[in-house]
Amino acid sequence: MKGRTLLCFALVFFSSATGQVSYTIPEEMPKGSLVGNIAHDLGLETKRLMSGKARIYTSDHDEYIELNRERGVLLVKERIDRELICKQTTPCALHFQIILENPMQFYTITVQVTDINDNPPTFEGDKIELKMSESAVVGSKYELERALDLDVGRNGLQRYELKPTDNFALNSHSKIDDSKNVEMVLQKPLDREKQDQINLVLTAIDGGEPHMSGTMLIVITVLDANDNAPVFTQKTYKATVRENSSVGTNVATVRATDADQGSNSKITYSITNKLDNVRKIFNINYENGDITLIGNLDFEESRNFQINLRASDEGGLTDYSKLIVDVQDVNDNQPEINIMSKSNVIAEDATLNTVVTMIHIEDKDTGDNGKINCFISENVEFTLESSANNFYSLVTDSGLDREKHPEYNITVTCSDEGVPSLSSSVTLTLQISDVNDNAPVFERSSYEAHIVENNTPGLSIFTVKATDADWNQNARVSYILEDSSVNGVPVSSYVSVSADSGVIHAVRSFDYEQIKDFQFRIKAQDGGSPPLSSNVTVKMLIQDQNDNPPQVLYPVQTGGSVVAEMVPRSADVGYLVTKVVAVDVDSGQNAWLSYKLQKATDRALFEVGSQNGEIRTIRQVTDKDAVKQRLTVIVEDNGQPSRSATVIVNVAVADSFPEVLSEFTDFPHDKEYNDNLTFYLVLALAVVSFLFITCLVVIISVKIYRWRQSRILYHSNLPVIPYYPPRYSDTLGTGTLPHVYNYEVCRTTDSRKSDNKFGGAGGQNVLIMDPSSTGTMQRIQSEKSILDEPDSPIEVSYYSQICICYSSTTIYFFI
């Protein structure tokens, strides 16, 4: 607009709670015009605006101001038309907030828009027609249509001018609402005969610089005489109506009277409002003056109305009045919840009073209907705090735990204090992000696993399982075998554990006879940073397999001797011949042994106890029974499949040793040699050879020494006195035993290492014979071993003579 002067000034002020800044700008500023340096006025740096993602929040749909973060200034975003935004309201201001994040802050900004003279006064129509009686008295007043100027203040409508002024003059004064009421006053009587029509021009002028104006043509038709004009009963009527009143509601009734009679006293009523929307909402019955609603009232748009009324008679005389209608507010607007800023995700270790969401509440109602109270659902870890007028912050008020509540649906409900109360709500969805605050937990406090011995290396034994209440990487569990030792050997040489699945594998094949159980610890560790872990003890139990046959301890099976148990012919039924003693290194039922007689020279003479291995006679021994009895006993364990061992028991049925010797001289040698026995025999032979050579050297040395001594004695002529050991008696070479027995023990130097062991039954003696010749018999007690120890093995040694060791019931033959 020509000559328009733009005046811009700013008034800045701050509050201690939240920053508040006020600016004043004229309307119609070009797009991009500077409003103010907001960064400087708020005391902020531009980098804070950038890092805080500063933005403008407004509850209105149209944004007229924009924020330039880089420069820290406010600019005009859209052309501002004060008349469009505020109409006649003054002062006119734009209210918005600037929101900052990290941390959340907001500042209230007010931009006051001042008016410029950009609108001329205008009339609703270009022309109005009036009828006036020629009898109208001087001083009669005629209200004219007012002009409308959208500008306010000094730029608004200021005065009217009427030309020509021959018969009429203007009487302009302000009404209650500060609008100019224009009355045309008759200054000179009318004469229809001289002039039946008068044309006047009404000009409305505002106070802007330069002035702007609008005109309207007034056409007056002079009528014949009508001496009395209608008169309203009140100059101003008042009425109150609720904003939710239905169409057709009677608002008020106005009345006017006319002193004339006939057609000159017939009054018609009308509404003279032109520029506003009064005639769209109200209607007057032109005959009786009843004013009714024909539209909807909205208190939030218009709180009161001024209805300009006119009463006219048929003579053209009029009177004017007005009806002031106050609209009564009804609680018909729910609170509006506007989310200014919110966080969708928050860490579970967030500190107390962390701001999650900021909201702004509006209610267009007034009074109690516009008072708002907001609250959230109970039993949640958040609270709603009021930070300013109708501004709320949702903050944490207790610790969060994602494992208990991974997500929150927080409903914010706001209600007004109207009757009945209206409310609205919004649901905020908040995800809780995980923090590694839970260690893995095993399903059990300890584990016990079983594996059968002789397993294949790499066999899957058992699976441990641990769970972590955290999420994603923090819940990813790895399994680690902790370092320890079993019998001095690292446990990793026994078992291994899969890091991902927790499956325990056997590294080696286990032997129950070597190790029966062991235990180790497994650590479960999550993938968090730093990682958390827990331990569990696993006890591994080795289960026995029947992988060892029974071993016969007695009677001892030798490769070069014949072992015989002596049974006198006078033995009764049930006579205990001997007892087969066997063991099984397995355990449980795999070590349960049973004995049975497999073969026998006379099966009717002997039986073996299935549980104890005792060999007893089952009938009376007779003279017809053979002296040599050969029994084959099989020892079986209870495993699946079972394993067994066989032992041969030689029994001599005789009352004397000579009878036994005569029968057993042709006893065949047992040629079944044990592999271990062969090894020991070779070793014994080597040792005996070494000892033989050593002894030979010693004997030769002694012989030489004695020979030299004897030569000395011979030359010395000393008498020779023979010496005999104590209790020695000469048998004169008859071959019978002396009354004092001389015992010799026949053993090798390495006889302790033999695998053949024996033990004698209580009260029994052993007889050892050479089947090829006779010789010295030696008697030993059963309580003492032939060797130094009871379980010492016996090796075969070849000598030039035969050693026969005997007892009362058992005979051993060594060649």
Image: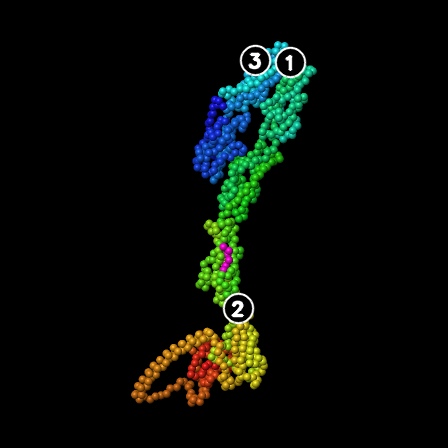
Q: In the drawing, what numbered circle is on residue 165? A: 3
518, 671: nearer the viewer: 671
How far from the left and from the top, in percent, is residue 411?
Answer: 57, 41
Tag 1 secondary structure: strand
Tally of numbered discs: 3
In this figure, which colouring scheme has been used for the structure?
Answer: rainbow
User: Is disc 2 in contact with disc 1, using a CB cutoff of under 8 Å?
Assistant: no
Query: Residue at the left extreme?
Result: 715
**Mark 1 or mark 3: which comes first in sequence?**
3
Per the image, the residue denoted by label 2 is 546
**Magenta span covers which residues?**
500-506
Q: Between marks 2 and 1, how big is the CA–CA gap?
A: 142 Å
Would residue 504 be counted in the magenta stretch?
Answer: yes
Q: In the drawing, what numbered circle is on residue 223? A: 1
Q: What residue type is labelled 1?
A: Leu
Q: Between marks 1 and 3, how big is the CA–CA gap?
A: 20 Å
Query: Residue at the top extreme?
Result: 194
537, 48: nearer the viewer: 48
Q: What residue type is labelled 3?
A: Thr
Answer left or right for 800 relative to 425. left
How far from the left and from the top, in percent, is residue 314?
Answer: 66, 17
**Mark 2 or mark 1: which comes first in sequence?**
1
**Mark 2 or mark 3: which comes first in sequence?**
3
Q: Please rate how many residues cluster around mark 1, counting C-alpha atoms within 10 Å: few if below 14, some from 14 to 19, many from 20.
A: many
